[in-house]
Amino acid sequence: MALNKEIYAAFEGVVGPEFISNDPAMMPAYHQVKFAAIILPKNTAEVQAIVKLCNKHKLAFRAVCTGWTGMFPPDIVYIDLRRMDRIVEINEKNMYAVVEPYVITAQLQAELFKRGLHMNLKGAGSNCTAMLRGHGHLDQTTSGDDRNHLAIEWVTPEGHIVHSGAAGSVNEWFCGDGPGPSLRSILTSAVPPGVTPGVFTKAAIKLYHWPGPSRFPIEGTSPNYYLDEIPANFMARYYSFPSVEKMWNAEIKLGENEICFELMGFNVSMVAANITTSNEEDERVFQEMNREVQGPGFFVIIAGNSTADFEYKKKVLEQIVRENDGQSLKSVEDPRTEGILLCQCIRVSASIRETFRAGGAFNSIPVMGQRDLTIRWAIGAGKAKEPLIDKGLIVPDGGAFFGWGVEQGHLGKTEIFCKFDPANPVAKEAVEKWQQEQAKRAFDERYFAMTMGPQDEIGPALANYHLWWKKVTEALDPNHTSPEAGSLV
């Protein structure tokens, strides 16, 4: 649907002719979808004006930050937020940062390191917007973004500007909940569809202490970044255990002692992917590591605030691992490999390869809940894969479930993969059946699985959230200008 000249001129009057286009040749540079127009605002006032015009002319819009992923219906007004790329404030005293949508995590993290600070980095990677809500490698010490998003500036689907939390009451950014009524559950919805209508134009993010260097000494090129020198008082290790129970007991004890900067329940498939640069090398290293490990395991980073603190944390780590019959993966102790993993997992470029080993496409089931229970769920899902492996329908992957603790193990995520040849219809059908059955089991056992099924099936078990969410979105977006369509990061 092409905009008529009058409507196009109205949008052009907001941003100027240089920052709007409806040229069909421009569309593939964004997505393989024909949009009504692509428009690039520079500030909140321009976003508000665009949204109001969309309401006036009954046009649907979608705002996008870094555009790493997302689904887009045709004929919408595509609001590209790349000009809104300012770090508005880094408040060192109160430990928060305020950013616009196009500030990426790597950019903000680099500035924070200079000030002895860091933040939660999402597993999607450091190339995504710093405003992205989610979980990732540093959850053990920084929690997830349901904790870390503070005050937010939001342009509603009708074009009103709302400041949540402290920003709406005392014009500061330190709190997302008040003083006054909180909008957190609407603005950072964690349940499907999980996308708040409208446009976030600023967000405050909680910060944490950083014990490392002011400049991370990164060398190399993607996907093989590494640290030429291990920073003082840092260490990375991978430990395997003879059973899931012993691995989990070690995780619990490490959480109770609060000594790990990072704890990720990687499988060796993911470790191999993170330290190699080709599928052939990846497969070779994976087979070598798979022969060395004794069972399931996890990856840890220790970061000391001083030499004494570092030595104490190492001793506690070694004792807990020893008591649970854990073994260190010797190849990770090599300084070059250790440097790669420190870089990949603190800067979070690990997602480039860790879930995309050789072997074709993959389906996965991510489950949130109490970590020990989700691990037990994943064991059952793994056993259900064994007949598919025996038939040659999926890739033998050494177990290929992983997860991590949040807030020293108070919460957790577990995810299990199933890799297969997408050109094989029998394999594809078998994997989809496995995914549906195991996701339903997660639901029946009362976990949260992102692949559980239609909302009208799972909603009644979760306080009919889908009905309440529909009422909320109808009230916020009566003109249906901001359709929901998955996470846009």
Image (cartoon, grey):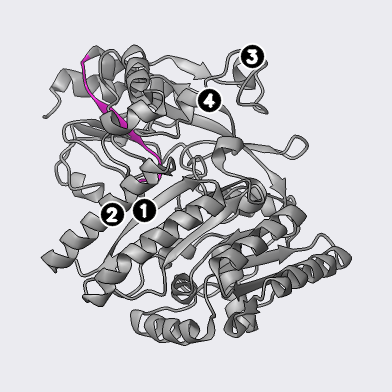
- For label 4, the SS is helix
Going from the N terminus, do you reach mark 2 or mark 1 first? 1
Mark 2 / mark 3, whichever is N-terminal: 3
- Percent x, y for residue 367? 43, 48
- Residue 189 quadrant: top left
Question: Going 34% across and 28% down the picture, which residue do you hit?
Answer: 459
Q: Residue 383 in magenta? A: no
Amino acid type at mark 4: Arg
Per the image, the residue denoted by label 1 is 365
Dots 2, 1 in contact, CB < 8 A: yes
Q: Earlier in the sequence, mark 2 or mark 4?
A: 4
Q: Which residue is mark 3?
A: 169
Q: Find residue 184 and name its label.
A: 4
Per the image, label 1 sits on a secondary structure element best described as strand
Can you say which quadrant of the picture contains the N terminus?
A: top left
Q: Amino acid at mark 2?
A: Gln
Tag 1 or tag 3, which sits nearer the N-term? 3
Within 10 Å of the Cα at label 1, are there few (<14), some (14-19), or many (20+) other Cα atoms? many
Labels 2, 4: front one = 2
Q: Say which element carries label 3.
A: helix
Asked which quadrant contains residue 347, the reply is bottom right
Q: Which residues are magenta?
A: 57-67
- Residue position for label 2: 435
